Image (spheres, helix red, strand yellow):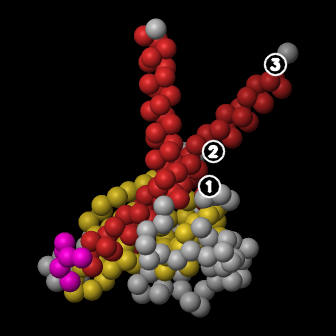
Amino acid sequence: MDTLVLFLGFGTGITIIIGGIFFILSHNPQGQNTSTKAIEGTDFFPSQMFMGNDDLGGLAVNERTRQVCLFSSPSSPPRVFPIADLVGSYLIKNGEMLGEGKRSYPKQIVTYGKELHVKKESLIHSLHIGSSGEENQRIDLLVAVHDEDEPLLVVNFLDIETQEGGSLFEKSLSTATHWHLVLDGLILEADRVARLQSESTTGKKMAEAAP
């Protein structure tokens, strides 16, 4: 009887965790863009989309197809990636790292993320050097993808003289946090899929090698 209760409790816990992840991925805060049309120049249909305050960086996701779309600037075409190419998501407020989601598998993606560290830190410093939190407030989401040409994308949520804790600041931080959690959930899913694929390949090789 105790074993049955423990098993049911464990199953309920897993269900709550999975349900929480899908709630984050499917929840769309008020004021964010959604579309039933493909993004121009692509066959990507976003379920959630956000364009940064500076109109330079933006991102969109489609949880069903497990894809992300990144916008670098109005003059550059959007780039569509499978979630397998997601490397990291970093939430930064006035130079302070508030949230960090990084791939843990496979090894080559983890290594690539480590190789981006210096470039990532330099970019954060250059963006937030004038944001002390006393006058100008800046909130960014830094997205890292496995792409040799442009691995880092900055999506800005706030860059203005305002008070920390004010309504504008809190709304911007809430939206940025939402997107960080969305990407973090996709990163966890990418790790899970990669592990399953690796285990499946290993199982097939072992079966083929068996006498």
Name the residue beneath numbered marker 1. 84
What residue sits 65% from the left and 57% below the top? 64
Question: Of circles 3 and 2, which is in front?
Answer: 2
Residue 193, numbered circle: 2
First reached walking from the N terminus: tag 3 or tag 1: 1
Count of labels shown? 3
The residue that disc 3 covers is 210
Q: Is residue 34 magenta?
A: no
Query: Residue 100 — which label?
Result: none
Is residue 46 or residue 108 the one in the foreground?
A: 46
Whether residue 208 is situated above or below residue 54 in the rendered picture = above
Give the alpha-carbon distance from disc 3 to disc 2, as whole Å.
26 Å
Is residue 70 visible from the viewing direction of this image? no
Q: Where 101 sits versus 169, above or below? A: above
CB under 8 Å between discs 1 and 2 = yes
Q: Tell me if residue 165 is in the magenta stretch.
A: yes
Marked residue nearer the N-terminal end (3 or 2): 2
User: Majority secondary structure of the magenta segment?
Assistant: loop
Q: Quadrant of residue 30?
A: bottom left
Vertical side of 87 occupied by 30: above or below: below
Task: Locate the C terminus and report the quarter of the image it occupies.
Answer: top right
Answer whether residue 36 is visible to the viewer in this image.
yes
Q: Which residues are magenta?
A: 162-167
The first of marks 1 and 2 along the sequence is 1
